[in-house]
Image (cartoon, helix red, strand yellow):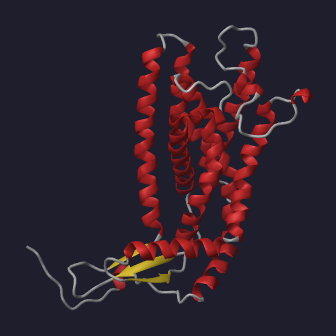
Amino acid sequence: MKIKKYFLVFIGFIVSIVVFATIYLLSEMMKNVPQPLIPRTYVSDFIVILPGLPKEMNIPGLFTDIPILYTLPVIILLIIYAIAPFILLLYLGLHKLTTKVSTKTYYGIVEPGEKVGPFKLFRRALTVSLFSFSMCALIVEAGYGGLFRGGFQKDMILHQAEALFLGTFFICSFILIIFIPIWLLEDSGIVGYKHSKEKRHPPKIEGISSLYSSILEGYAGISTILILISYIIGTLEVVKPGDAAILTPIILIFLPFIITGLFAIPLIIYESLLPKAIKRIHRKLQKYDLHYIDIPEFDQVKTDRIIVVD
């Protein structure tokens, strides 16, 4: 295993562990404080929707929820890997529907490379985090923050922010169901080719994953910025200067980076299983008339029509 390419997601993993430990320690230190910095419900229940052990066992919900948060993404990843060829055919079918109205698209497979850098893996983890953040905000805004935070009051901006903080940890695992197939589309080298001599369009060769990733990444980034602005302004309207509650919107700013820590182990498993997964995917796609194509290097392209512009 090459540690270098996982460097950034490992940092996220360490940060997430530190955050969970800090929540517990601060809560324990402020047990008898009337208005503690960390609500006691963070330790007793943490994410309310997650199942915990019986109360009489006196094991805080935080201790039962954290293993689930790190294990659930791995389980979802393995399930998707098991049915990956069929999911990719579904994504391919959706791509064909969206391009049917314009120039016909031909599909093929470009032999994928093996190298991947740390920034690409971190970007993937961060995109899932941002999209999870925006999806959870919709749930909280709809008044269902009580699924995540005990004693939730939907008219209190701080309760909404806390429910958003807790709920994003839960939702991000299920958001992987959307994004892992997109990663597999890209990594398996499935491309679409468009060219028409009759229409005034240049030839276009593009990975079909780009259609999905560009839309989802754009939405995740813009919606996250708007959500953060809304919560920061809303908190400043009700919190006095110097009040510890001002930390709530601040931690929301860093939340997407903290969430990436939950994907460190799944990304390592993803990369280790990827070669076998690609072979299975390619065998399946070739049955549907998708075959390997060669993309020439730029200096290999020959032309006898050269236009010189002074």
Q: Residue at x 40, y 44 (%)?
A: 222
**In percent of the image, x 91 and y 27: which residue is there?**
56
Picture quadrant where residue 16 is located: top right
Q: Quadrant of the C terminus?
A: bottom left
Q: Residue furthest left?
A: 310
Query: 100 above or below 7?
Result: below
On the picture, is 61 further left or further right than 147?
A: right
38 displayed left or right of 301: right
Give the answer, above or below, for where 163 lies relative to 105.
above
In the rendered image, the vertical position of residue 73 relative to residue 200, given as above or below: above
Measured as percent of width and height from the top left, residue 265 is found at: 71, 52
Q: How many numbered tags mark residues here?
A: 0
Q: Nearer the viewer, residue 61 or 275?
A: 61
Seen at 59% across and 36% down, the residue is 144
Q: Position of residue 135 (x, y in %)?
A: 53, 45
Residue farthest to the right? 57
Residue 30 coordinates in the image, percent (x, y): 72, 13
Position in image of residue 1 (x %, y %): 71, 60
- Which residue is at a point 49% across and 14% down the rendered structure image? 239
Note whether residue 6 is visible: yes
- Is residue 188 visible in the rendered image? The answer is no
